[in-house]
Amino acid sequence: MEAVYFTAESGKRTAFLVMDLPEASHLPRVAEPFFLAFNGTVEFYPVMSPEDLMKAGPDIENAIKKYS
């Protein structure tokens, strides 16, 4: 776990968890306890580090060429 922040959003108790998940297959490990124990809602927002963005450069360029 990188960081945890607690707040209220739309009148509901909310936690923002910042973590490094190396694979999408790790999502259930994080989400299922919130679904099962708290009947919670879980949303994921994948982000990239600057290093990840550099690695993605060629794929971004290819998408620009194909779809622009």
Image (spheres, helix red, strand yellow):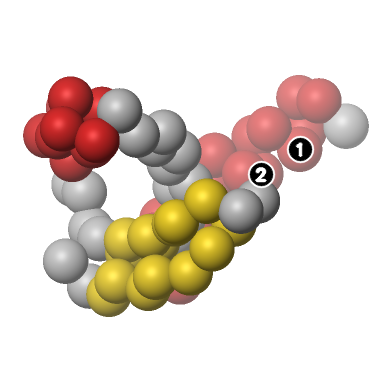
Viewer-proximal residue among 29 and 59: 29
SS at circle 1:
helix
Tell me if residue 32 comes above or below residue 59 in the rendering: above
- Percent position of residue 12, x then y: 52, 51
Under circle 2, the secondary element is: helix
Q: Is residue 45 left or right of residue 61?
A: left
Q: For the N terminus, which image quadrant?
A: bottom left
Q: Position of residue 42 (x, y in %)?
A: 39, 36
Q: Which mark is residue 64?
A: 1
Q: Quadrant of residue 34?
A: top left
- Can you name the residue that lies furthest to the right here? 68
Task: Name the kind of residue labelled 2 in the image.
Answer: Glu
Among the 4 quarters of the image, the one containing residue 28? top left
Amino acid residing under circle 1: Ile
| Side of 36 where 49 appears, left or right | right
Residue topped by disc 2: 61
Q: Residue at x 24, y 35 (%)?
A: 38
Residue 56: percent from the left, percent from the top? 48, 50
22, above or below 7, in the image:
above
Residue at screen point 21% across, 49% down: 21
Query: Spatial distance from mark 1 to mark 2, Cα to Cα?
Result: 5 Å
Taking depth in this image into account, of 56 and 44 the one nearest to the observer is 44
Asked if the residue under mark 2 is in contact with the one under mark 1, i.e. CB atoms within 8 Å, the reply is yes
